[in-house]
Image (tube, grey):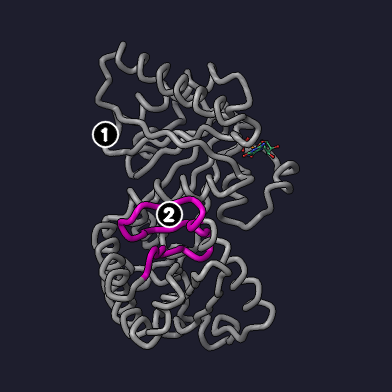
Amino acid sequence: DLLDVADAEKPRLLLMGLRRSGKSSIERVVFHKMSPNETLFVESTTKIEKDDIISFIDFQIWDFPGQLDFFDPAFDSEMIFGQCGALVFVIDAQDDYLEALQRLYMTVTRAHKVNPNISFEVFIHKVDGLSDDHKIETQRDIHQRISDELSDAQLDNIHLSFYLTSIYDHSIYEAFSKVIQKLIPQLPTLENLLNILCSNSGIEKAFLFDVLSKIYIATDSSPVDMQSYELCSDMIDVILDVSSIYGISDKDSPSSTSTPTSPTADGDAHALIRLNNGMVLYLREVNQHLALVCLLREDNFEKQGLIDYNFRCFREAILEVFELRRKGYSNGNGAADE
Ligand code: GDP
């Protein structure tokens, strides 16, 4: 079946956790642009949901109901964990989390047995309600408890990563970015290309964003500070809003809808915002899914011709890197391009 072939090639991400931990909200906010407040009315997950994300990275979220029973014979762990790249386990930090930890332990040990290559990502979620001290204490406590349990069972080799997340700020995007980056085999190449671009163009910081989700799939190797990340990610929203209201988009023309991944159909959109601290935010579209957003000093931006030239080389290289991967399917709906 062609559809299965395409599905199998996608890095698969599982989202799990107890009921009401926030899974549906996370998915709605990050991948469907729902505003955090609206999630108050989201119906809780009651079945396994397979959500195909239409973006540059074709991954899936399988939203498991919290009450899922591993010992139910209908639960096919081979199938579920077998091809899964990352398992994201969501814990409600505003609630008593002992039961969630129990569940996490069971899930991790079970999944690891089926597939030792899964990366385990724990989202300590809803931390917007916690003080900074409380956040750190909660993370330490959760880390400690689960590590103790794993080492009691001589399973120290299972590695878990922890993130403090909330849908009310950028932390959920930051966490997802790190999770997704682990699933992108081309990451070192992308980082390298970004480093070259930055050093040749006088750019301080550059992010390669998946436009739809605002997940950054790569950045140059200078340290990420939250403030520049937020600036760059907010710029995407601003540009998307303005261009969807006032812009002429290729995507609207009927002729281009038949080839949604054609990288050269568009990719020329760019935008510039001068900040009041002598810095410039510069956005360039790589293709319809990806955009480069960079932060640089205004004096360096005087050489815009050079930057644009470097960007074009960068874009060509990026598209080449992904070319091989994209072969085989034509769009994010999983339809095979045969
Ligand atoms: P699910 O059962 O795991 O899918 O959980 P839901 O997505 O239905 O979320 C349960 C509740 O948690 C909803 O009322 C959400 O508004 C709330 N929620 C989700 N994420 C956050 C968060 O980051 N902070 C806060 N304060 N509440 C959240």
The kind of secondary structure element at disc 1 is loop
Give the residue displayed 37% in from the left and 62% down from the top.
2
User: Can you give x and y, in whole percent of width and height, for residue 150 in the image?
Assistant: 33, 18
Give the residue number, with chain letter if any, for mark 1: 116
Question: Is-magenta flag for residue 191?
Answer: no
Q: Earlier in the sequence, mark 2 or mark 1?
A: 2
Disc 1 marks which amino acid?
Pro
Relative to the observer, which residue lies in front, 71 or 124?
124
Q: In this picture, is 274 found above or below 192?
A: below
Q: Is residue 312 left or right of residue 301?
A: left
- Expressed as whole percent of the image width and height from the top left, the position of residue 310 reads 31, 80
* In-front residue for pair 61/21: 21
Visible residue check, residue 290? no
The residue shown at (41%, 60%) is: 57
Q: Nearer the viewer, residue 146 or 234?
A: 234
Residue pointed to by mark 2:
59
Question: What's the residue at 40%, 46% (across, down)?
Answer: 179
| Position above or below: 111 against 327 | above
Q: Quadrant of ligand 1?
A: top right
Query: How busy is the neighbourhood of tag 2: few (under 14 within 10 Å), some, or many (20 plus)?
Result: many
Residue at horizontal 52%, vertical 23%? 138
Please report the bounds of the magenta region as a residue range. 203-229
Q: Is residue 271 above or below residue 136?
A: below
